Amino acid sequence: MIAAAEALGYTTGAISQQLSSLEKVVGTPLLQRVGRIVELTDAGRVLAMHADELLKAQASSRQAVRNAVQAAAGTVSLGVFATAVGSLLPPVAEKLRIQYPLIILQAREFAVDEVGRRVRLSDVDLALGLDYSAAPIPREEGTKLRALLAEDFGLAVSLTSEMPDCVALTDLAHSDWILPPANTHFGVAVRTVCRQAGFEPRAAFEINDTAASLSLVAAGLGVCLVTPMMLEFAGSRSLRVCSLDTPVQRQIVLIERLQDNYDRSAPLRTAEVIAETVRGLGIP
């Protein structure tokens, strides 16, 4: 009782009164004295097991009432990675402006491997990230991932390449690769799928910049894995994309905090707009 009072900032008398009131509501004793200590009864243990659900339901109900009487408003910070800025941010910002004009969206760019940590540290309210089955994005404590859109990888080659339109990864064991650095999640993902196919990819160049990688591919200096969203960074460069006979995918995900600001509807509404917009893009 003393520890509970100290943790909550109440007196022990106030804690005792609250528990007495709670026992009247549920209609049964929740505490029992055993020697010199106080223990929960069976009913008390059951109620304690459901405490989180009850508190979340209470917070959710309060938020629903707030949303009914006032429009979502406030500033929401969104963490983004480089390739998301051109493809995903403009339609999200436009839809948010139309649906919730009182929400001010601020975007901050981070390395894609950093965005989850930034949400955990509250540097941003939400973040867009990338999840690879071969190299999952770190699951940061206190955050959750919402899968929004799956993208299939193809193989980018130069226009002069004699690579077939559909290629097996096993046929690329002797190719020169333009690879992301091995200490990035994308770098781990590419190397892992190649190893699963039975070979270690030969890195002709280790480049983290998508536009630079595609420039090297267009010049005939190697091959790289690419998604439709990444292809937007090809610019005027001419290259060809071969399909893979075994699908390799990545997921665009939204990273949120587990207990996200029940007293502020703006991040929650922004998250819904982001999810709806990205899922509806259908990136070709």
Image (spheres, grey):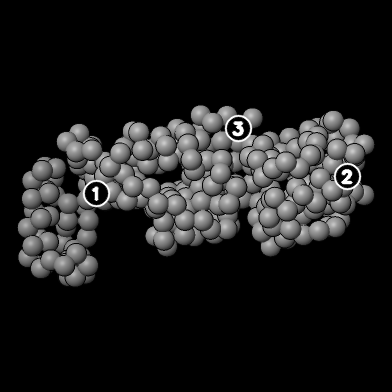
Q: Which residue is mark 2?
A: 172
**Which residue is depicted at the point 47% across and 50% down?**
127
Q: Earlier in the sequence, mark 3 or mark 1?
A: 1
Observer able to see residue 271: yes
Q: Is residue 198 visible?
A: no
Q: Is residue 32 above or below residue 268?
A: below
Q: Residues within 10 Å of mark 3 (few under 14, many from 20)?
A: some
Q: Amino acid at mark 3?
A: Ile
Helix, strand or loop for disc 1: loop
Instruction: Determine which of the numbered discs, if any, sits on residue 263 in the image.
Output: 1
Foreground: disc 3 or disc 1: 3
Q: Is residue 55 left or right of residue 82?
A: left
Earlier residue among tags 1 and 2: 2
Label 3 residue SS: loop
- The image shows residue 272 at horizontal and vertical percentages of 39, 37
Rendered image: mark on residue 283: 3
Image marks 2 and 3: residues in contact by CB distance under 8 Å: no
Amino acid type of the residue that numbered disc 1 sits on in the rendered structure: Asp
How far apart are the alpha carbons under marks 3 and 1? 34 Å
Could you tell me residue 65's position as x and y percent?
18, 37
What's the residue at 7%, 65% (across, down)?
13
Residue 229 occupies which quadrant of the picture? Answer: top right
- The foreground one among 46 and 204 is 204
Query: What amino acid is at disc 2?
Result: Leu
Q: CA distance from mark 1 to mark 2?
A: 53 Å
Name the one closer to the observer, 160 or 66.
Answer: 160
Quadrant housing the C terminus: top right
